[in-house]
């Protein structure tokens, strides 16, 4: 439901150009479990969610899809669905694909293969009290993401790029009333009540804790996030439009070591495990990032 990367291309590659597909730009709500399989509490409500679709009419989206996500017991018809012009707001979304790599690196940046224990053990909460060094890395990631989006817009004119705003602005817009400190990027993330209940994914041993290489925070946001973005950057470079991705590449390399994967080799996306990913191929047109050709 919540989409990331080039999932629309994966759908077309598997099911063909007539596939009926929709993707949400963000999750429709954040929830806390009360009783498994029976009850939850919404801790991060949304008034609206953005959606992009293939071979689905706007009427179908409002009539059939929107009611599936409305929290009707609140007495208001929310969140409502807003139709996007293309998939660029999904692909270039300043969300998990840059937040999680920066946060996880910050928590385990001193990990050298041996479990961390005692004072070196990372915070049990994924976002709370986010270190300033993580916030600085996140800010650079967002700079690179915005530069990549701007370069893609200049090359293609894809209208959806105009809906991609910097991460700090998105946090203020979506969670302004739930953030208590706006002074730095780390403080904005670390004091966001909507993020406060997420625990750090880790593996605990008698000697301490180690990062969990199979958790979605690692696998999804590297393979389906940063690697996708770097593939677009490499494709733009082929057109004579280089963009800075040094922080993205550093974090891919750090995470791929945890996963035992090979995506980047000598800084390029040519590793043996790239076949597992959905990347923009060198021979494919840039326009596929925004929208596949009509069926």
Image: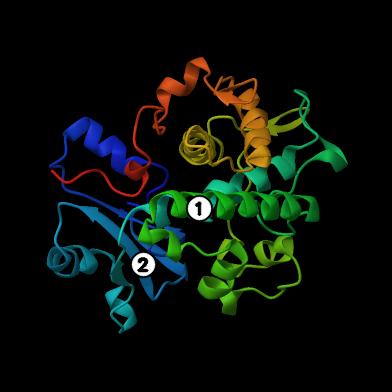
Query: Which quarter of the figure has residue 31?
Result: bottom left
**Image quarter hosting the C terminus:** top left
Q: Is residue 192 visible?
A: yes
> Mark 2 and mark 1: span between their CA atoms?
21 Å
Left or right: 129 in relation to 282: right
- What count of labels does the image hold? 2
Of tags 2 and 1, the one toward the viewer is 1
Residue situated furthest top in the rendering: 272
Q: In this figure, which residue is indicated by the disc labeled 1?
A: 149
Q: Is residue 192 above or below residue 206?
A: below
User: Which of 218/33 is in front?
Assistant: 218
Query: Which residue occupies 71% across, 73% down?
Result: 182
Q: Residue at x 36, y 61 (%)?
A: 159
Residue at which label 2 appears:
49
Relative horizontal placement of residue 31, taking residue 267 as reference (left or right): left
Q: Position of residue 35 (x, y in %)?
A: 41, 58
Vertical position of residue 236 compared to residue 173: above or below: above
Q: Position of residue 112 (x, y in %)?
A: 78, 25
The percent position of residue 239, horizontal first and vertical second, equals: 47, 36
192 to the left or right of 90: right
User: Which element carries disc 2, helix, strand or loop?
Assistant: strand
Q: Is residue 27 visible?
A: no
The earlier-in-sequence mark between 2 and 1 is 2
Q: In the rendered structure, find residue 193 and report the number of the disc placed on it.
A: none
Q: Position of residue 224 (x, y in %)?
A: 46, 38
């Amino acid at each position: 439901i919540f989409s990331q990367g080039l999932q629309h291309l994966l759908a077309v590659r598997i099911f063909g150009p007539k596939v009926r597909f929709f993707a949400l730009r963000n999750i429709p709500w954040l929830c806390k479990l009360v009783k498994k399989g029976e009850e939850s509490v919404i801790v991060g409500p949304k008034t609206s969610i953005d959606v992009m679709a293939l071979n689905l009419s706007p009427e179908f989206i409002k009539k059939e899809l929107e009611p599936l996500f409305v929290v009707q017991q609140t007495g208001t018809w929310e969140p409502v669905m807003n139709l996007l012009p293309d998939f660029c707001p999904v692909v270039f979304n300043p969300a998990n694909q840059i937040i999680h790599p920066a946060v996880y690196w910050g928590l385990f940046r001193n990990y050298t293969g041996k479990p961390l224990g005692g004072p070196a053990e990372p915070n049990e909460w994924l976002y709370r009290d986010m270190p300033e060094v993580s916030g600085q890395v996140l800010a650079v990631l967002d700079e690179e993401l915005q530069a990549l989006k701007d370069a893609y817009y200049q090359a293609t004119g894809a209208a959806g790029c105009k809906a991609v705003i910097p991460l700090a602005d998105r946090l203020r817009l979506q969670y302004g009333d739930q953030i208590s400190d706006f002074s730095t990027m780390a403080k904005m993330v670390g004091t966001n009540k909507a993020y406060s209940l997420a625990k750090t994914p880790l593996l605990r041993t008698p000697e301490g804790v180690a990062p969990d290489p199979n958790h979605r925070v690692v696998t999804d946001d590297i393979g389906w996030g940063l690697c996708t973005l770097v593939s677009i950057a490499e494709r733009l470079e082929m057109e004579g439009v280089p963009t800075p991705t040094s922080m993205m590449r550093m974090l891919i390399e750090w995470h791929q070591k945890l996963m035992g994967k090979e995506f980047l080799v000598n800084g390029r996306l040519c590793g043996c495990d790239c076949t597992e990913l959905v990347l923009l191929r060198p021979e494919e047109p840039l326009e596929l990032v925004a929208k596949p050709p009509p069926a």
